[in-house]
Image (cartoon, rainbow, N blue to C red):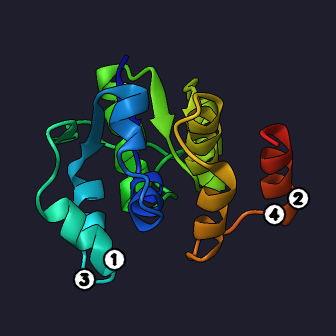
Amino acid sequence: MIIVSNTSPINYLVLIGQINLLPELFEQIIIPQAVHSELSDIAAPQAVQAWISTPPDWLKIQPVSQSGDAIVDVLDPGERAAILLAQEIDADLLLLDDMKARRAAINKGFTITGILGILDQAATMKLIDLPTAIDKLRNTSFWAFDSLLQKLLDKHA
């Protein structure tokens, strides 16, 4: 299975101490250079910068050779590069959280999930304590409707 990730899912998994869910769920993750740059940017949280400074073996950084189009050109660089890379390598799944990016990816026919989908899958497989993970996520800059978070918690109660 070929999985491409944008910055957000990796960022938040590092911040909540659950980054090792990615290799447990998907074995390998591929990110474009633009995502690597965003994760290592001075504006990124220190923990994220430290984590990406020595990427794990399961994370592959790959350049994007395609140029954009009107659908993806309105997105942030990491989102745009993730979608273009996913197109280029015919990815099976795209990890995205931003709503505009998710819509663009769906319009291009991609299967997508984000941080909440990853946590949902991990909770289903009994890999995490979901209430603890959601509490930690709420203490970051991640935003989701409380009703959505509660629905996820209720599903695994």
Read off the residue under disc 3: 42
The numbered disc on residue 147 is 2
Q: Amino acid at mark 2?
A: Ser
Residue at coordinates 28% horizontally, 30% vertically from top-left?
28
- Distance Cα–Cα, label 2 vs label 3: 33 Å
Tell me where residue 79 appears, x and y as whole percent: 44, 52
Give left or right: position of 117 versus 3. right
Packing grade of label 1 (10 A; few <14, some 14-19, many >=20) is some
**Residue contact at pointers 3 and 4, CB within 8 angstroms:** no
Q: Toward the viewer: 112 or 28?
A: 28
Read off the residue under disc 1: 44
**Residue contact at pointers 2 and 3, CB within 8 angstroms:** no
Q: Amino acid at mark 3?
A: Ile
Task: Specify the quadrant of the image occupied by residue 36.
Answer: bottom left
- Distance Cα–Cα, label 1 vs label 2: 28 Å
Tell me where residue 9 appears, x and y as whole percent: 47, 53
Read off the residue under disc 4: 145
- Distance Cα–Cα, label 4 vs label 1: 23 Å
Instruction: Give the number of the mark in front: 2 or 3.
Output: 2
* Quarter placement of the C terminus: top right
Residue 86 higher or lower than 92, as above or below: below
Q: Toward the viewer: 69 or 123?
A: 123
Q: Amino acid at mark 1?
A: Ala
- Distance Cα–Cα, label 3 vs label 1: 5 Å
- Distance Cα–Cα, label 3 vs label 4: 29 Å
Q: Secondary structure at mark 2?
A: helix
Q: Secondary structure at mark 3?
A: loop
